[in-house]
Image (cartoon, grey):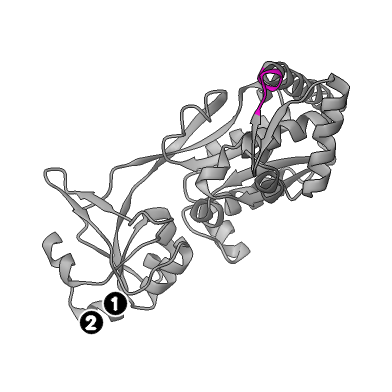
Amino acid sequence: MQIDDIHAFFRIHSAGSLSEAARRTGIPKATLSHQVRRLEGQLGTQLFDRSGNRLTLTHAGSTFLPFAEDLVRALARAEDAVARQAAAQSVRLRVGTVDGLGTNLMGPLSLAFMEQYPGIQLDLLIYDAVDLFQRDAGLDCILFADVPPPEDAKDMIAVRLGHSVSRLYAAPGYLERNGTPTLVTDLKDHQLIDRRLGATPPRWSLSDGNRRVELLPDGSISTNDQWIAKVAVVQGYGIGCFPEFFVAGEVAAGALVSLLPDWETDRTPISILYPSHRFGNPHLKALVRFIRSHFEGFFYFPYRRTDVARLQA
């Protein structure tokens, strides 16, 4: 029984179909199908019911699943046990996060980490939030800004780094042309730009500590990318609601100004998570410790190496 075949079984089960598993992993559908059929041949039973495009576990597949999980975790623990005795040469860790955190937090932190640990190689991967905790992603750790989904993260250790809060921002040019809102009710007369995910309209829930308002951004620009939304606001197309860390660089440069500073979203936790069975991996522990101790200060993307030096000084 080959471990690659068991991994293919996991990936297809998690994704629900061969096509989705191939999309998530970059492994050809034919390869995944061959691996699962080889595993079924060795076990002498069918693991999936194949009806249409969806694949569901058979009774045998459901029985096999927890034992296969134990095998994969045992292999990871064995690799980590060897890693504790070996130098950090040719070590590669896969780190996953979402777009805003990747460029503004995980990118700078990871580059600084590699300065101190040159023997450890990193794969920095950006995912949609819905895919981030899929077990077939094969991630060693995850940087996440929100409460982790309880079922998907039940076997993970979460290390709290801090919190994120979003506020309102606009470009000086936009305010010169359209006026500066002084009351939260003034926002109804402005272009509100936000990232839109799927068919569900975005919603801003803001509070000043005493009152709460719910706003539906309906600006002339719609995008599913947070960076494009920020660029649109920087270029004066409307008002945006962004995490502080995401726009700290633009605010410092005068490209954006904060509006209605008493109004903000609820605070969202930022955590780094990793599988509990990987606790013994020394390289993963080194990465988690580094990110935890260096988290403050990396609240914007340092385009120049001198920016990192200035922050660390």
Q: Residue at x 42, y 54 (%)?
A: 245
Q: Amino acid at mark 1?
A: Pro
Say which of 154 and 244 sits in front.
154
Q: Is residue 59 one of those drawn in magenta?
A: yes
User: Do labels 1 and 2 touch, CB within 8 Å?
Assistant: yes
Q: Position of residue 93 (x, y in %)?
A: 72, 40
Q: Is residue 42 left or right of residue 120?
A: right
Above or below: residue 124 compared with residue 282: below
Q: Secondary structure at mark 1?
A: helix
User: Circle 2 sits on which residue?
Assistant: 176
Residue at image location 68% in from the left, 25% down from the top: 278
- Marker count (numbered): 2
Question: Can residue 98 be seen from the camera position used here?
Answer: yes
Q: Which residue is mark 1?
A: 172
- Looking at the rendering, the stretch of residues picked out in magenta corresponds to 57-62
- Position of residue 254 relative to residue 51, above or below, is below
Q: Position of residue 192 (x, y in %)?
A: 28, 67
Q: Residue at x 40, y 73 (%)?
A: 232
**Label at residue 50:** none
Q: The N terminus lies in which quarter of the figure? A: top right
**Image-quadrant location for residue 79:** top right
Image height of 90 relative to 43, above or below: below
Q: Position of residue 60 (x, y in %)?
A: 71, 18
The one of 33 and 101 positioned closer to us in this rendering: 33
Secondary structure of residue under mark 2: helix
The disc labelled 2 sits on which kind of residue? Glu
Residue 233 picture quarter: bottom left
Q: Is residue 205 left or right of residue 41?
A: left
Tell me if mark 1 has few (under 14), some (14-19) or many (20+) residues whose alpha carbon lies within 10 angstroms of its own.
some
Q: Is residue 87 visible?
A: no
